[in-house]
Image (spheres, rainbow, N blue to C red):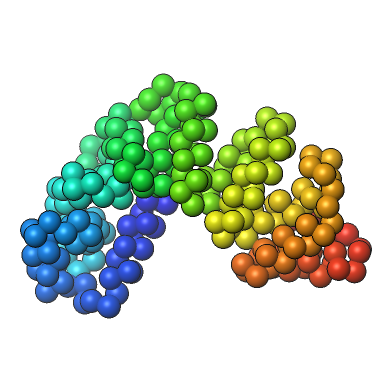
């Protein structure tokens, strides 16, 4: 689902253009002249069937071309097609493509490969490898991977690392990660209690659109506790 949303986002980013056969022709021409972004957008059009007749085979071809041109998101989208079974389910091939996309700097590829390692799908189950790839995705700014790492470390009782990854997720703009870290600082125990830090983080969560963060920010200012999720 996350991959599909990313593909749809590519199409939305092209909203200045009419997504029709005229646009398809324009993108095809640009793709033929080695423009990887055009190849990726054209692949997404065929993948979703937006403005052209849906064709997984054409999407596969274009994503493969994009990947070969060094654009990691093309590898990621093609990996998703193999993982989801849209072009014949092949988890090992998906893992191979995610690995290539990750090396090329695509955070989504790193995260997708991490999930495969965590679940032992297409690769041998290896939690350490999963953590390594989640970390690469988090470092590249993918907040959902930061959040997942924070959860894994909390479950393992390593609250120092959990707090670090909550912070990374918050820095990447995830409001709920800001709130999660704020609660840790407010409650103490797992990290040193710091009400001022908690208040600042709840304020940031609020600014990022977290309603609970807004409520907790106001409550902490009045020293009356905080609201549970």
Residue 213's spot in the image, x, y percent? 72, 64
Q: Is 156 situated above or below 216?
A: above
Q: Quadrant of residue 176?
A: bottom right
Residue 58's spot in the image, x, y percent? 14, 52
Q: Is 118 situated above or below 216?
A: above
Task: Give left or right: position of 204 versus 174.
Answer: right
Residue under the image location 27 percent in, 78 percent down? 16
Task: Give left or right: position of 85 versus 162.
Answer: left
Residue 33 at least partly seen: yes
Q: Is 16 situated above or below 68?
A: below
Residue under the image location 85 percent in, 64 percent down? 220
Residue 148's spot in the image, x, y percent? 57, 42
Quadrant in which the C terminus appears = bottom right
Q: Using the image as rendered, state which of residue 200 and residue 226 is in the foreground.
A: 200
Residue 90 at least partly seen: no
Q: Using the image as rendered, state which of residue 78 and residue 199 is in the foreground.
A: 199
Residue under the image location 82 percent in, 59 percent down? 196
Q: Is 215 situated above or below 120?
A: below
Count of numbered marks: 0
Task: Give left or right: position of 125 versus 177.
Answer: left
Residue 108's spot in the image, x, y percent? 40, 47
Residue under the image location 56 percent in, 60 percent down? 173
């Amino acid at each position: 689902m996350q991959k599909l949303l990313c593909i749809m986002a590519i199409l939305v980013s092209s909203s200045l253009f009419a997504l029709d056969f005229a646009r398809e022709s324009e993108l095809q021409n640009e793709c033929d002249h080695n423009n990887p972004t055009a190849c990726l957008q054209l692949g997404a059009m065929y993948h979703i069937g937006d403005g052209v007749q849906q064709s997984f085979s054409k999407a596969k071809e274009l994503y493969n071309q994009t990947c070969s041109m060094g654009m990691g998101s093309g590898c990621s989208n093609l990996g998703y097609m193999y993982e989801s079974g849209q072009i014949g389910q092949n988890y090992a091939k998906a893992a191979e493509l995610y690995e290539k996309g990750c090396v090329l700097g695509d955070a989504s590829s790193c995260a997708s490969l991490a999930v495969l390692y965590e679940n032992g799908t297409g690769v041998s189950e290896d939690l350490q490898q999963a953590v390594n790839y989640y970390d690469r995705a988090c470092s590249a700014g993918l907040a959902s991977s930061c959040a997942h790492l924070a959860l894994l470390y909390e479950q393992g009782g390593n609250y120092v690392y959990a707090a670090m990854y909550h912070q990374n997720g918050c820095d990447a703009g995830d409001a709920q990660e800001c709130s999660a870290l704020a609660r840790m600082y407010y409650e103490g125990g797992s990290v040193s209690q710091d009400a001022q830090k908690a208040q600042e983080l709840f304020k940031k969560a609020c600014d990022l659109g977290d309603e609970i963060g807004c409520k907790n920010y106001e409550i902490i200012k009045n020293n009356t506790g905080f609201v549970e999720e």
